[in-house]
């Protein structure tokens, strides 16, 4: 792998939690970052905050709602058109249960919301990014899961992508 200062990394779900902490840590180390979030208002503020805190100005924000497979595809298209290489894809974005866990919520495409955002979206994004990741070899894909019961699905979805070289 290249030194971190020479790497370009896409991280989904960066406007809070683990994604935000990872973005800050990698920015401090000098990586070029492509940060994804669903909230168009919070994204630019996050980028500004990280740039100011770290001095790293190689940070871009991409807005996409991962409950829409069309927006996942558009996110991939934008990233592919913006960068020549991608050293790592971190599928971190996820959605948990709302206030009423018994209430079924649907994605924009009619799938159960958690299944759409936590599994379908990272799978589609990974599939669309594979040509760029392979061309950037050795590249890595990291799938973040919220608990052990979700791990087997993440492992299954990325098994094909794990052979990037």
Image (cartoon, grey):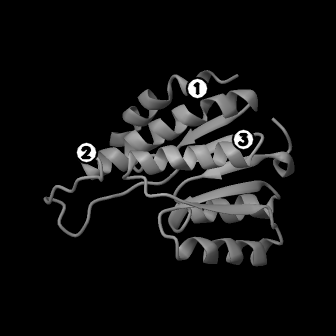
Q: Please identify the residue farthest to the left as the structure is shown.
A: 102
Judged by depth in the image, the label closer to the viewer, 3 or 1, is 3
Q: Which mark is residue 162?
A: 1
Mark 2 or 1, nearer chain start: 2
Q: Secondary structure at mark 3?
A: loop
Asked if residue 144 can be seen in this view, the reply is: no
Mark 3 or 2, nearer chain start: 3
Crowding at label 2, few (<14), some or many (≥20) Cα neighbours within 10 Å?
some
Q: CA distance from mark 3 to mark 1?
A: 15 Å
* Vertical position of residue 138 compared to residue 12: above or below: above
Comparing 37 with 20, the one in front is 37
Image mark count:
3
* Vertical position of residue 41 compared to residue 92: above or below: below
The residue positioned 46% from the left and 51% from the top of the image is 71
Mark 3 or 1, nearer chain start: 3
- Reading the image, the residue beneath label 3 is 86
Crowding at label 3, few (<14), some or many (≥20) Cα neighbours within 10 Å?
many
Comparing 163 with 81, the one in front is 81
Q: Secondary structure at mark 1?
A: helix
The residue positioned 62% from the left and 43% from the top of the image is 89
Q: Which mark is residue 111?
A: 2
User: What quarter of the picture does the C terminus occupy?
Assistant: top right
Q: Secondary structure at mark 2?
A: loop
* Vertical position of residue 43 compared to residue 83: above or below: below
């Amino acid at each position: 792998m290249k030194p971190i200062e020479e790497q370009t990394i896409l991280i989904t779900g960066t406007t809070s939690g683990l994604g935000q902490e990872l973005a800050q840590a990698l920015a401090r180390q000098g990586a070029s970052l492509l940060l994804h979030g669903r909230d168009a208002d919070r994204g630019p503020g996050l980028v500004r905050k990280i740039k100011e805190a770290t001095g790293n100005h190689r940070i871009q924000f991409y807005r996409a709602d991962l409950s829409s497979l069309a927006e996942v595809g558009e996110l991939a298209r934008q990233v592919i058109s913006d960068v020549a290489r991608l050293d790592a894809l971190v599928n971190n974005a996820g959605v948990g249960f709302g206030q009423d866990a018994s209430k079924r919520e649907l994605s924009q495409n009619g799938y159960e919301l958690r299944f759409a955002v936590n599994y379908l979206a990272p799978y589609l994004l990974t599939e669309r990014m594979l040509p760029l990741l392979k061309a950037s070899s050795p590249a890595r894909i990291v799938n973040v899961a919220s608990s052990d019961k979700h791990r087997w699905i993440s492992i299954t979805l990325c098994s094909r992508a794990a052979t990037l070289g």
